[in-house]
Structure formats: C-alpha cells, structure tokens
Image (cartoon, rainbow, N blue to C red):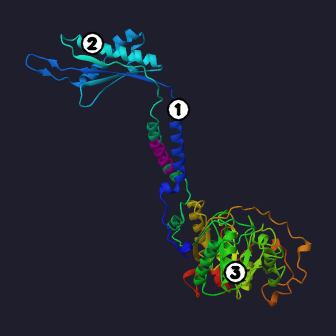
Amino acid sequence: MIFTGRIDKPRGLILTHLWLVVLATCIAMGASVAAATSRPVSYTATAEVVVSPQKTDTSALQPDMGTERAIAESGVVVSHGADALGIDPAVVQKSLSVSVVPQTRVLHISYTAGTAEDAFRGGSVLALAYVDYRDSQGTDTVATLVTRPSVPASGSRGSLPLFLVLGLFAGLSVGVGAAWLWDRVSDRVRSAAELTETTGLPILARIPRWQRAGGPLAPDSRARESFAFVAARLSSMAGHSGTTIVVTSPRGGAGTTSVACGTAAALAAQGKRVVLIAANPAGIRPEDVLPVTTSPGLTHLLARGCSRETALHPTEIRNLSLVPMGGPGEDGLDLEDLHLVLEKLERGACVVVDAPPLLTSADSLLLADVAHLVVLVGDPRRVRRGDVREALALLGDVSPRIAGWVANRPPRGRRTVSPPAPPTADDAPAEQPVSPVGDAEETAPPRPVAVARKARPRPGMRPPELPRTTSSPRDDVRPFPAPAAAARRR
C-alpha cells in the first residue's frame, strides 16, 4: 500500500509548470545562438602605447592612466584619425576601443572593421594620432608606440559563451514569469494535495495511468492495488453490506466509469455481493466492455417493466452483477422510483452507481440524495478549483456523506461509445413484467419509461433539477448526516 497511502506534498510553482520554464529557456538560448551566428564577421587590430612619466624640476609625475584613456578616446584624437581615414568621426568613435593594462602604463588602442585591412589601417592611424597629440602638449616625449598593429588573421562574430549565458538568464526569467502568470490565470488544481487543501476531503487513493486494453478494469497491478485500497476504505466507512456508493465527478473526463468498475471489482474480490449500476449516459459504459447484454436495464427497472432478477446481468467477475442503462435517459430520474429500486438491490448486496457528472446532470444529485456514500473522482492535472467548489456547493444541498476524493489519471486510448438506440419490441423481456417493489405490485401493468421517470410532484419536494432535502441522522452511519430521502427507505 505504499503507492496509494503515501503523503503527497503540494507541488511548487516551478515544478508544476516546469515544461513552460524549460520551453522558454530553450527558445531564448536558441535565439541567442541564432543571433550569435547571424552577426557579420568583424576584424580587430590592436596597438600598444606606453605612457611615460612627465619630468619636472624636482621629480617625475606618474601618468593617470584613466585620464590617458579618456584622451585617447577624445574627440580631438578621433577627429584627426577620421580625417586621415576619410570616414565619418561617428563611425570611428563606434569602432574605437581603448583599455588599460592593470598595474601598468600601457594602453591598448583597438579598432574594429569589416575587413582585416581596414582594421589594420584604423588601428595604426588612431594610435599615431594619440601619440602625436600627446607629444605635442609638451617638450618631452610622453607617449611611445611600442607595438604596431598587425593585420588580423581571422575575424570573430562575438563571444558565443556570452550569448549562451545571456540567453539562459533571459529564458529562465521569462519562463518563471510566464509560469507565475499562467498559474494566476489558470484555475486548474496543481496536485492531489492541493485538491485536499481546497475541499478539506481526504484522498482515498491515487490511481495511476494505465494502458486500457478494451475495458475499464485495470490490468496493471498497481492500479488494482489502488482500487483495493479504495474498497477497503469504503468498507470501513460503510460498516454493513446493504450500502449504496455513488461514484461521480464535477465534470466529465475524470474516468468515473473506470473508478466505479474498479471499485466494484475490488469489493467483489472481498467476498461481497456487488451490484454495479450504469447510470452515466455519456462516454464509455460498463455494459459495453464487461461485456453483458444491454437490455433490460435501469430504465426498464425504473419503469417497472421488468423484474430485479431480469435487470441484473452476471459478469465474468465473481460476485459482481451489472444493471446496464437499458436505454437513453432523456427525462431524468424519479426520486421515489430510485428509493424503491435501491431498496430491493441493497438487500444483502453493495450497490455501486456510476453516476453522471454533478455539474452537467441533475440526476447525479438525486443519486447522491439516496446514497450512503459519495465518492468524488478528479484528475489532479485537469480538474478546476471553480468546478470543485461548485460541485461541493451542490452536494451541500442534499448533504450526503462524502467519503473523499479518488485522484485518478484516466487511461489513454479512451473511446467514445455512442448512446444505444431506443428500446424496441424485441428488447422487451420474455417473461411477464414484474414490479421490483414487492408482491402487492407484481400484477400492476407496466408503465411507459418516459412517464415512469418523470418526477411526480409531492408536498414539500422541490423539482429534480434543484433537489434539496432536510438531513436527519442515520443510525448505522455516525456521526455523518444522511439525507432524509435515504432515511425514509429504512
């Protein structure tokens, strides 16, 4: 149980959006390399000039090399050099660079040009212009050209390591800023731990992603162990066999069908009789992959068009039976019919309901109203905080006992299953229709599905679109409140 029982810490900003930081860094470094390689080749020629101390009557004054550097870059020297070269002084000023060798009296006068000959000529002219100007200011020789510039053998496009360092720094800065902005704009939950912090509900298990091969049941041992962990937690919470567990999610795409099938199979492996009810008309359905016949099913059972034994279809998994959808659910569920059906199915069995998403179907609220436990499924990488809060607000109206979250990563290769065609006369059961509610109603004529599933108004009950009931305590589930509608069944 190490995999499912670990304590997960919230992921930091950079780890959560690491892909964005890496992408920005790679783009910035690529742009730096492109900029470095696209620069034109330049040539530099350098001359060395030694500045001598100025002699006075008493001593020799050491030259201020900072001042000498400013003189070599001054407009007077640049103007004399530009006149000798026959080019604009602004171009000469941009191409000239003067540096001082530390702890010496040596100036390096460099000139950069597009060709080796122009660089050599410019370096020679500017070095001589400085020497002539400096020596003309007195009677003594102050500046001496000790190393004449030479024709550069090769050119340069700039320092590639410098460009890479600048690109790395710029990419990291832009990546972190983009990650922060993305995190502020995005409403998605970062991790399972943040899901717990947002809702205050525990994480029952973390289901890893597995490669689905034709069905929602997990072939991977780690995933099966995770579902066994969920089943053990739910068994300890329920405390008795006749329990209804509703598996739902805020929105679609979280893999509720996979979680419902895996949990039902894990409960059946514990030796319990389990009934899995397919009540989610969207996406993949359990009856399409287990496989069982698709009719009769839940719609016929709610319409009292078949018996409980006929609607229960055995599966290849021991102790697990399935009640398929049986037809399209267009008119919604009826709360009273659900009470009667679940009361029959719960006798000696654990009922697991694959319910539709809370924010897209009002039927999920009716199912939560008659459930003993509600299991919420969420993909930590896709679920949004706003959807989580809205789903919990809707569940607060019916006040079910919420067991917790299952952090699920839906398996790859999902396929969309088309809704089955409306039931025809050939789909009707061969035996005489029997009501699932007892001997007193077994001779009652069958009702049409559409009529039976319409909510019948009763005093004090709101419409099914916004169900709201008053909670009262249940004797066998303490200390959590259970809805009054479920309490009436007991």
Of 480 and 107, the residue lying toward us: 107
Q: Quadrant of residue 107?
A: top left
Residue 118 appears at what percent x and percent y? 44, 16
Question: Which residue is at 21% across, 14% downward?
Answer: 141
Q: Nearer the viewer, residue 443 or 279?
A: 279
**In the rendering, at what x and y percent does residue 16 appear?**
52, 57
- The residue depicted at 61 percent of the width and 76 percent of the height is 225
**CA gap, disc 2 and disc 1:** 39 Å
200 is higher (above) or lower (below) than 472? above
Return the x and y of residue 307 as percentages of the image width and height.
82, 83
Q: Is residue 442 above or below residue 125?
A: below
**122 left or right, relative to 14:** left
Q: Nearer the viewer, residue 413 or 52?
A: 52
Q: Is residue 312 left or right of residue 371?
A: right
Which quadrant holds the N terminus? bottom right
What is the crowding at mark 2: few (fewer than 14 residues within 10 Å), some, or many (at least 20)? some
Query: Is residue 463 something that shows in the picture?
Result: no
Label 3 element class: strand
Residues rendered magenta in the picture:
168-179
**Quadrant location of residue 258?**
bottom right
Residue hosting label 2: 133
- Which residue, given by chain and number where applicable, does mark 1 sit on? 37
Find the distance from the CA under tag 3 to the CA under tag 2: 102 Å
Percent position of residue 486, x then y: 65, 81
User: In the visual, does 321 lie left or right of 96?
Assistant: right
Label 3 vs 1, first from the N-terminus: 1
Mark sitting on residue 351: 3
Residue type, label 1: Thr
Q: Residue at x 47, y 43 (%)?
A: 168
Q: Is residue 167 left or right of residue 226?
A: left
> Callout 1: few (<14), some (14-19), or many (20+) C-alpha neighbours within 10 Å?
few
